[in-house]
Amino acid sequence: MRLTVEDDATGVMSDVHVDCEPSDRVADVLAMISAAVPVRGAPVVNGDLVPPEQPVAGSPLREGSVLHFGREPHTVPARPAAQLVLRVVSGAAAGTELPLLPGRSVVVGRDASCQLVLDDPDVSRRHAQLVVGPRRVTLADLGSRNGVQVDGAAVTGAADVDGKVIQIGGSRLVVEAYRDRAAAVGRGDAGELLLNRTPRSRPQRFEPPTVAMPARPADDDDRGFPVLPALLPLVAAVVMALVLRNPVFLVFGLLSPLMLVGSWWTERRRRQRRGLRADETYRAGLTAARIRIEAATDDEDADLRAGWPDPATTVRTAITPRVQLWERQPADDDWLAIRLGRADRPATVQITGDPPEGWTPPTLRLAPLGVSLVDQPVLGLAGPPGLLDAQLAWVVTQLAVHHSPDELRLAIIAPDADEGQLGRLRWLPHLRAEDGSVGAGWDPAGAERIIKFLGDELQRRSAGRARDPARQARPDLVVVLAGTADLRRRPQLTNLLNRGPAAGLRFVCAEADERQLPDGARARLVATGREVVLRLDRGESRAVVPDEITAATAEQVARSLAPLRRVGDAPGQAVPPSVRLAELAGEPDADEIRAAWGLQQDGTEVVIGADADGPFLVDIARDGPHGLVAGISGSGKSDFLRTLIAGLARANPPTAVNFLFLDYKGGAPSRTWTPCRTSSARSRTSTPGSPPGPSRRCAPS
C-alpha cells in the first residue's frame, strides 16, 4: 500500500510503501512508518483520527491516502442539499464545482475573498456576482475590465444564466441541476474499494437529418396594360362613324377598351393574391426549415457535449465516484477518445435546395473537439511548459477516468518531469505494474526501465499476432512520452514508435517545440503564442480553445482512483477473448500420444477451452451422452467440434473410440470434417449428396 506521510509541523511530505497484511493492526503499520519517517503527533486521515487498534482492512488507510501527523482532527460540517451547482467547465479552474443555495450570492473574481477564485489575468478582482433566487439564478457584472458574456452576448444588466454558458476571462462556467448518481462501491477483504461497473446506458447517437429548403416562388409574368389592343377598336370606331356618318359606332368603340381594362385589372389582382400566397407559403416553409435546422444543431451540440465530457464532469466522475467511472469498453466507438478542447465547427445537418439570400450555414459554437487514439495512434502536444503540463495532465486524467485499469494500462517516460506537475499522476492505478512498481520513469534510470519493459511487451504482442493475426492484445497500452526528444535518437524508442501502433500500443508525445515531435504524430495540438491549433494528417487545421486542468486537480483525481479496483479485474477472473488448444494442452508429438494411450483408457474428459479459473473440461460420459452445439454461421461451431474431436482422439486409441460424421447440410460446411477425415483412420463421413448407400448405412453404424 502506497501512502503519503506529511508532518504538519515541518510541512515535509514523504511517499512510503507499506508492506502489510489486511489483518494487521493500524498501530503496527504506524510503528513501521514512524521508524522510517520521523513524525510526531496523532495520525489523521481526511480529518479523522486513525484508530490504532483497527485492522488495516477496516481503517481509513488505503492506497493514495495522505496521512497527516500533528494536525488537529476536524469534522466537515454537513452542507444543506443544493439543487443547483456552478461548474467551471474550462479554464484555469476547470473541474471546480460550487453548490448554489437559495438566498445566497456568489462572487467570482481573482481576489481571494471571492467564493469562486479564478487565477486569470483577464479576470478582475471582483468580476461578477451570481444571485440564487427561488426560481432562477441571475448574474450581474461588477464593473469588470473585460466584461461578461452569456451565450456569446455581453451582459449589461441582470441576466438569467440557468443552463447557459458564462464566459469570464478565459474560463467558461455553467449553472446546472445537481444530479449525481454515485457508483456502487464496496470494501474488499484487503481493504481496497471495489467498484461494480454498471451496464452502460447510452442514448441513441445523433444522426444528422436532411432538411429541404423550400423552392423560391417564381416571379409571375406581369404583361402590363394592353395599350394597343385597347386603342385599335377605338380607332376603327372613329373611322366607321366618319364614313357612315353614324356616331353610334363611337359608343361601340368605347366598349372594347373598357372590357380590356376590366380584364387586365382583374388578372392583375389575381396574380397579386397568388404571389402573396406563394410568398406566405415560402416564408412558412423557410421558417419550418430553420426551426428543424436549429433543433438539429442543438441536438448535435448536446450529443457532442455528452459524448466528450468536459473537465468539470470528468473530475467529478472520479471524485464522487459516479456510475460513469470506467464506463468505456474496448468495443465502444469512443474507446480511447480524447477531448482536447473546444472550437467552432460547421453543423453536420444536410441541407438541400436553394438557401435564401444572406444565408449563414449552421455552426456549432465552441463545440467539443478531440481525437481517437484508435484512429490516430500517435498524438502530439507542443507548447510552452505551463500550458503543456496542464494539457498533458488533462489528457492522461481523462484516459484514467473513462477506462478501467484492467482494460487500459498507462506508461509514462518523462526523464525531466517536474514532480509538482506531471509527477502527481503517479497515484493512478493504470500506472501500477503487476509487481507493485509504478509504470513511469521520472529519471534516466526509470526511463531505461520502462523502455526495456515496453520493448519486451512489443516483442510479446508481435509474436502473438504472428500466431493469430485476428487476436487483439489486451489490455491496451498508452505510452506518454514527455520531453524525450533526445531519447528518441535511440533505436529502441524509435522501434517502439514505428512498430508499436500495429501491436496495439498508442502514444501521447509532448514537447516544447513542435519540430521535436515524432513524424508519426499525425494529430498535433500546437500552442503558438496566444493561439492553439489542432492539425490533422488530412491537412485540416482548426483553432482550438484548449482544455486543461491544474496539477493539484490531477493529483486529486489520481488519489481518488488509487484505492479503486473493478469487480472482476483480478488476474485470472476475466474470461480470455480467445485461446488455442495448444496453449492449454501443449503440442505433443506422435510418440507422446502413443505413450499416453498406453497409460489411459476410456479418456472421456476433454479440454475444450478456458474460463475464468483456467482450462475448462467436459466429460462426454458424465455430461452426455448427447449434446447440442448451436450458433449462427461464423460463431465457432466448427472450431468447437474440431477441438472436441481432437481432444478425444488425443486421449483415446482407435480401439477405444470411433467417429461418425453425418453432414446433412452439405456444401462448404463439409470442409469442417476435412482435417478429421484426412488425419484419422477411425472416422466415417456421410453426406446427403453422396450415393444412397452410405446414408442407408448410418443407422447400423
Image: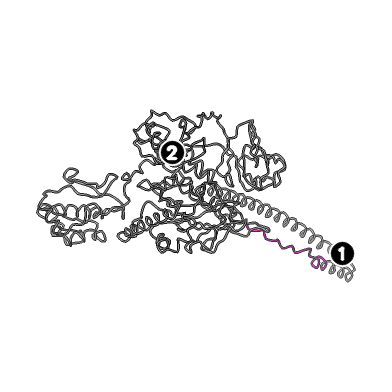
Q: Position of residue 202 (x, y in %)?
A: 46, 45
Comes first in the chain, label 2 or label 1: 2
On the image, numbered disc 1 is attached to which residue?
Answer: 250
Q: Write down the region rendered in magenta.
A: 212-232
Colour style of the rendered protein structure: one colour
Q: Quarter-wise, where is residue 500 in the image?
A: bottom left
SS type, badge 1: helix
Relative horizontal placement of residue 126, taking residue 33 as reference (left or right):
right
How much space separates mark 2 and mark 1, taking CA atoms?
128 Å
Q: Which secondary structure dominates the residues rendered in magenta? A: loop
Q: Quarter-wise, where is residue 260 in the image?
A: bottom right
Q: Looking at the picture, does residue 361 appear above or below residue 322? A: below
Crowdedness near tag 1: few (<14), some (14–19) or many (≥20) residues, C-alpha within 10 Å: some
Q: Position of residue 482 (x, y in %)?
A: 49, 55
Magenta span includes 444: no
Q: Looking at the picture, does residue 137 appear above or below residue 210? A: above
Amino acid type at circle 2 is: Val
Amino acid type at circle 1 is: Leu
Magenta span includes 214: yes
Crowdedness near tag 2: few (<14), some (14–19) or many (≥20) residues, C-alpha within 10 Å: some
In this view, the residue in front, 221 or 237, is: 221
Q: Is residue 197 visible?
A: no
On the image, numbered disc 2 is attached to which residue?
Answer: 37
Position of the N terminus by quadrant: top left
- Residue at the limit of the structure toward the bottom, as seen here: 243
Task: Report the mark closest to the observer, 2 or 1.
Answer: 2
Q: Is residue 77 visible?
A: yes
Identify the residue shown where x is 17% and y is 43%: 622
Q: Position of residue 584 (x, y in %)?
A: 24, 52
Q: Quarter-wise, where is residue 495 in the image?
A: bottom left
The image's mark for residue 658 is: none
SS type, badge 2: loop
